[in-house]
Amino acid sequence: MMGRRIGAGLMTLVAAATLAGPTEAQERDIVDTAVAAGSFNTLAAALEAADLVDALKGDGPFTVFAPTDDAFDRLPEGTVENLLKPENRDQLIAILTYHVVAGRVTAEQVVRLEEAETLNGATVDIDVSRNGEVRINRSNVIQTDVFASNGVIHVIDEVLLPPTSTDRDRMSSRDVASARAAAEILNLAIDRGVPLFNDGQTAATAAIYEVAVRSVLAGDFTLPNRARRELERGLRDAGREHGSRDRAWAYRGALDRALDEIEGRMATRGGRRGHH
């Protein structure tokens, strides 16, 4: 299922071209649409090897993040051939179902999500950049809203590989220092802002909080997606406030929510936060 998360802002993705006309799209299912396109031959072969063709020709609806042949070619040499072997069918199924989400989710809906649960059971991260580019994990979405009779296809330029427990442990150990550094900046801003706020210097407090938020967002920090969204939300909320006191509160709420996300996802936040 696709779970709705914090909004990522309104934007429109423009497809480079459609793979089929409107009439054809309504007549062809997802598999036939991909085969007719001619640029998903490896994906089609993988679906057949995994015995998933009939499933994706079913009623659905499904949303498929479809890697092109070029995307499969970028995998290490021999990877595809190895996955297509009968003895590796379970691994192939795990990878392919990691590209499929239940339901018909259009581009307009995708950009309002932070993550989506796939048929694999694991989630993919969805990130929308300020210039409107969309990434599914580390893969770029290069074409959207290719409609089929039983769902929709969004084309991506890299194969999505589902996380294993080892991968998650490795990412946590590698990224924890970066997340901790970001948390220290946010906590330091709170430590400095609280006494100023309590002393009536609300404009100075709001300024300190804003600098911290912008510094973390602009820096090369590894953050949980939701933490980043909360900081971005704080900038928007504070920008709508006219008084410095209200701006300080808007920023403070964002700092607290972001720190809670960092603590919950990576257990990296240290220090004690003050209150105003």
Image (cartoon, grey):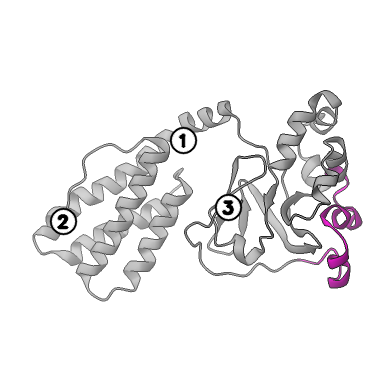
Q: CA distance from mark 3 to mark 1?
A: 19 Å
Q: Earlier in the sequence, mark 3 or mark 1?
A: 3
- Could you say which is closer to the camera, residue 31 or residue 127? 31
The reply to whether dot 2 and dot 3 touch (C-beta < 8 Å) is no
Q: Earlier in the sequence, mark 1 or mark 2?
A: 1
User: Which residue is at 81% across, 52% downward?
Assistant: 58
- Could you say which is closer to the camera, residue 6 or residue 140? 6
The reply to whether dot 3 and dot 1 touch (C-beta < 8 Å) is no
**Label 3, on which residue?**
126
Instruction: Give the vertical position of 82 relative to 236 (above or below).
Output: above
Report x, y in % for residue 184: 30, 42
- Could you say which is closer to the camera, residue 162 or residue 148? 148
Neighbourhood count class around disc 2 (C-alpha, 10 Å): few under 14, some 14–19, many 20 upward = few
Report x, y in % for residue 187: 26, 46
Q: CA distance from mark 1 to mark 2?
A: 31 Å
Report x, y in % for residue 159: 72, 43
Residue range corresponding to the magenta coloring: 16-43
Q: How many marks?
A: 3
